[in-house]
Structure formats: C-alpha cells, structure tokens
Amino acid sequence: MEQCAQENRDVVAKSEELDNSSSPDSEAAAKPVLVILAGAPGAGKTTFYEGKLKAVFPTNLRASSSPLEQTENNQERSRLQKEQESFVPSSTRMSP
C-alpha cells in the first residue's frame, strides 16, 4: 500500500509538470509519455485514470468486441497518432 501511495504521488507530480509546460520548447512537451496501468479486474485502474490521469490524457479509446465499434476506434487512433495527439488505449483483454 505504501508503495502504491508513492507511485500515486509520482504520477500526480508528473501530470502537474505537463500541465505547467505551456512553452513548446519545454522538455516535458517535447518527450512522449507512455503510461501503463495494469492489474486484476476491480483493482482500481479506471478509478485511478479518472481521478489522476484524465486531465492530462482526456481521450480514452476503449477496445470493443463489436467489429463496427472497434473499426471506429482504430480510425480514431490513427487520426490521433497522425495529429500527434495523446490518448489512452483501454482493453479488458486478459492474457493467461
């Protein structure tokens, strides 16, 4: 629990740095960021995203079992990547 709390503070600090980097020359704005939230179902990944990361990464692309919805998500992901916009891909797929 203590380690989780420390990680939580670190992420908040990093997101504040991103929020305060209004200069395009700033180091935080120039570097891509990769955040991976992993855990068992019900561990609080979505709650953590909603409470701590959504302000910095507002676009959440959720994987879908519907081929039509997944095609739309793939098109949106391609658009965001082309425009170099941040997004969060979400999936509930579990690997053994």
Image (cartoon, helix red, strand yellow):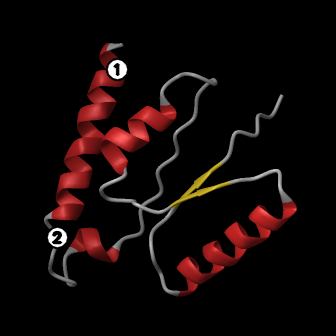
Q: Which percent across, then down, holds residue 71? A: 78, 70
Check residue 17 in the rendering and tell me which mark sits there, or answer none. Answer: none
Percent from the top left, x then y, of residue 86?
45, 69
Q: Quadrant of the N terminus?
A: top left
Q: Find residue 55 and report its image quarter.
A: bottom left
- Tell me: residue 56, above or below residue 11: below
Q: What residue lies at 20% left-to-right and 46% top-to-bottom?
A: 13
- The residue that label 2 is drawn on is 21
What's the residue at 42%, 42% (across, down)? 49
Q: Nearer the viewer, residue 73 or 26?
A: 73
Say which label, 2 or 1, has the lower sequence index: 1
Residue 62 is left or right of residue 21, and the answer is: right
Q: Nearer the viewer, residue 64 or 53?
A: 64
Q: Quadrant of residue 6?
A: top left
Give the label on residue 3, or none.
1
Q: Nearer the viewer, residue 3 or 51?
A: 51
Instruction: Answer few, some or many: residues within 10 Å of disc 1's Cα (few below 14, many 20 plus, some between 14 and 19).
Output: few
How many numbered callouts?
Answer: 2
Q: Dot 2 lies on which element?
A: loop
Q: Secondary structure at mark 1?
A: helix
Neighbor class of circle 2 (other Cα within 10 Å; few <14, some 14-19, many 20+) is: some
Question: Which amino acid, by three-letter code, is at mark 1?
Answer: Gln
Name the spot of residue 54 as percent of width and height, x first. Answer: 37, 52
Which amino acid does the dot numbered 2 rest on? Ser
Does residue 53 appear left or right of residue 87 in this picture? left
- On-image quarter of the C terminus: top right
66 w.r.t. 3: above or below: below
